[in-house]
Image (spheres, rainbow, N blue to C red):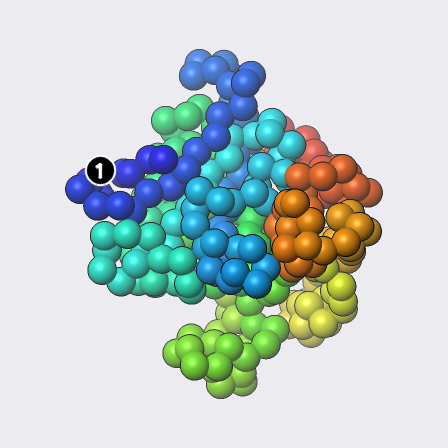
């Protein structure tokens, strides 16, 4: 757990994983940043930074892996449901992503942002919040949910749907041709249709329908309470292999 200097004397933190082959002055490794899901006991999601898993599974433990926080409105702890202090959460990424890349000898041309559920929405909602933060990423990955697809009632940012989708479309256009992998348990076509209707070209997008029941066999499972889970990436499957191949292509292209 790492608490940056801006939040010293608080419980705001991110986590960082360094692969066995990482060296401070060795080859620059790809880095994957992650936003976790909401606190949602039904699916086993704690909303905690420390309980993330998608980024590790997607990178096979071979990349530097960082789980970013949502900063609570009190600016003293992490938020486990939705965005917390939205401005502070985005600013945390703006400050710490470049810092981590520099301090941990990461490859600045192979910077992934991924997210599950709340985090999947956050990939665009936070990661493409404005032009400054959008420039940080080489490629983006979502699993289960996507910014702008459905209305989130009783939130100021996700309703009404028409207004939410207008703003989500602005964020989506900040992708600007970068590689984007959209994973969805079950029907991926709603997300694919949403993207196709709002962008002139989707050649940079790859859509994968991840059937988690095929991976786990049944629910509950020791690793996952329900089909809505980020833990699918921790087990071997054709879906994970497809994601790995896609990521390898992104890294090779960046070299």
Give the tally of numbered discs.
Answer: 1
In terms of depth relative to the viewer, which is nearer, 126 or 117?
A: 117
Does the rendering let one see residue 62? yes
Q: Which residue sits at x=56%, y=72%?
A: 148
Up/down of 94 relative to 80, above or below: above
Picture quadrant where residue 104 is located: top left
Q: Position of residue 106 (x, y in %)?
A: 48, 28
The residue lying furthest to the left in this view is 9
Q: Which residue sits at x=80%, y=50%?
A: 217
Q: Quadrant of the C terminus?
A: top right
Q: Is residue 145 left or right of residue 78?
A: right
Picture quadrant where residue 82 is located: bottom left
Q: Which residue sits at x=74%, y=42%?
A: 240
Residue beneath disc 1? 5
Q: Position of residue 139 (x, y in %)?
A: 59, 46
User: Within 10 angstroms of label 1, few (less than 14), some, or many (20 or more) residues?
Assistant: few
Q: Does dot 1 land on a helix, a strand or a loop?
A: helix
Q: Which residue sits at x=40%, y=58%?
A: 80
Q: Position of residue 39 (x, y in %)?
A: 47, 60
Q: Position of residue 129 (x, y in %)?
A: 43, 61
In terms of depth relative to the viewer, which is nearer, 219 or 9?
A: 219
In terms of depth relative to the viewer, which is nearer, 227 or 243?
A: 227
In terms of depth relative to the viewer, which is nearer, 218 or 149?
A: 218
Does the rendering let one see residue 179? no
Q: Quadrant of the N terminus?
A: top left
């Amino acid at each position: 757990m790492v608490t940056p200097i801006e939040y010293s004397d608080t419980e705001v933190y991110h986590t960082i994983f360094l692969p066995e082959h990482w060296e401070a002055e060795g080859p620059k490794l790809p880095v994957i940043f992650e936003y976790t899901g909401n606190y949602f006991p039904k699916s086993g999601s704690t909303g905690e930074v420390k309980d993330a898993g998608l980024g590790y599974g997607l990178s096979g433990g071979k990349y530097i892996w960082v789980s970013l926080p949502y900063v609570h409105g009190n600016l003293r702890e992490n938020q486990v449901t939705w965005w917390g202090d939205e401005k502070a959460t985005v600013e945390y990424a703006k400050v710490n992503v470049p810092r981590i890349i520099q301090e941990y000898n990461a490859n600045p041309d192979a910077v992934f942002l991924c997210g599950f559920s709340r985090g999947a929405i956050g990939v665009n909602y936070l990661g493409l919040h404005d032009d400054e933060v959008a420039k940080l990423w080489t490629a983006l990955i979502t699993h289960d949910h996507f910014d702008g697809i459905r209305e989130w009632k009783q939130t100021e940012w996700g309703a009404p749907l028409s207004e939410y989708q207008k703003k989500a479309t602005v964020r989506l256009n900040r992708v600007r041709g970068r590689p984007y992998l959209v994973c969805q348990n079950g029907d991926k076509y709603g997300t694919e249709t949403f993207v196709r209707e709002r962008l002139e070209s989707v050649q940079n997008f790859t859509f994968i329908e991840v059937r988690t029941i095929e991976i786990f066999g049944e629910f509950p499972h020791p690793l996952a309470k329900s089909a809505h889970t980020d833990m699918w990436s921790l087990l071997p499957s054709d879906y994970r292999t497809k994601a790995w191949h896609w990521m390898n292509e992104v890294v090779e292209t960046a070299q």
